Amino acid sequence: MLSRAGIADGGTDGHGYLSEMFSRGDHVTQAGEEARIQLVGSQQVLIKGDFEAMMSFYGGLFNRLTKEVQHTGDLTRYVGFQSPVGDDGDLHFLGIEVGHIDDIPDGMVAWFLGDNARVIWETREGHSVIVAQDDITWQWLTRSESGTGRYTGEYTGPLPVTADQPRVSTSHNFWISANSYVSLSTDDASSDEVELLDHDPSWSHQFTLMADWLTNQLGTGIARRIEHYGSTAIPGIPAKPVVDILVEIPSVTTAKPHVVSCFDDETWDYWWHSGHMAFVKRKGLMGQRTHHVHCAPKEHPIWDGLAFRDYLRSHAEEREQYAELKRELAVSFHSDRERYTQAKTDFVRQVTSKALRNS
């Protein structure tokens, strides 16, 4: 196991340690630690619910990761972790997976996650420097059965040290917040632009097929209830041709190792969103979206979306108001799916509150 004393003993110029660390192969450290996940990316503490700060952090990061980070290979993935900081903040880390760590772009950090250790580098004055070396404990760690052989998991350990942040030795939970595959050798990625279609009766059948598949894959102990919700579940509403599905799980802690592992292949994206697991099903790697699968326990507020669905099904006036709002926003935010969704929030909240009061 790597010791914290190794930072001082090994020197802090970074180069000697890096070369020795990978002298026996890309995935083995000098202390015998095998790499489970190696990432280069950025980290920042964000206030919970600060949408603009989140857009600022993530918005410019994806292009930098694919264009500036080396040693990714043709098939790689975005991987994210989050950890609570204080009462109202979370540490956000998003990186791209690499075969080995070297030449870290300015302003980024590198995470090496082994069986029992996490090593973090930064670039300072043009050199890769080790800034933290800590013991960690995996809460769960699984390897993809899809053929990629990639690892996903969650661990406990100290908050990362950065150039402007002192060491905090208290152990924190680090939950996986992103797992999304990407090919750097193709320009055929599907557009994520907002395109609305008139209601298609086949969306109900697409829901049924996916619900049956989810039940078979996850079992009724994990997938306790499955519902069709969102605009594709409301006749008369235009919608993006992506079927939204809600899955009731017993708890995030119980379900996440099973669900994230089940959907760990090139046709699924995973993102931790507003306190629940959100999965995007695509037609192949980086292909067109077909389904959004949201997994949350029954007490999560996302389930209020069923009240919104049922209210619009039976109230034509509000249904038409929502349809018109969606058409307007699809023009205003044609190339910005996140802001399109955010701009609907006030209307959705107002109707949902009315529906819950009348239920």
Image (tube, helix red, strand yellow):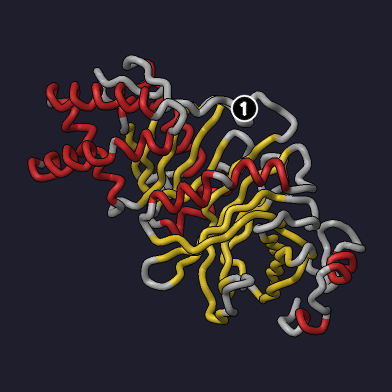
Q: Is residue 231 visible?
A: yes
Residue at point 69%, 63% (across, down): 113
Q: Position of residue 66 (x, y in %)?
A: 68, 42
Residue at point 65%, 58% (across, down): 107
- Residue sitting nearer the eye, 237 or 49: 49
Hey, which quadrant is residue 201 in on the image? top left
Residue at point 39%, 29% (across, down): 333
**In this rendering, position of residue 234 left or right of residue 112:** left
Q: Position of residue 250 (x, y in %)?
A: 38, 54
Residue at the left extreme, as displayed:
358
Is 66 rendered above or below residue 336? below
Hey, which quadrant is residue 39 in on the image? bottom right
Residue under label 1, please give it: 189
- Residue sitting nearer the eye, 105 or 269: 105
Q: Position of residue 318 (x, y in %)?
A: 15, 27
Quadrant of the rendering where the N terminus is positioned: bottom right
Q: Which element type, helix, strand or loop, lies under badge 1?
A: loop
**In this rendering, position of residue 161 left or right of residue 57:** right
Is 30 rendered above or below residue 280? below
Residue at the right extreme, as displayed:
23
Quadrant of the rendering where the C terminus is positioned: top left
Q: Is residue 114 visible?
A: no
Question: Which amino acid does the dot numbered 1 rest on?
Answer: Ala
**In this rendering, position of residue 355 left or right of residue 169:** left
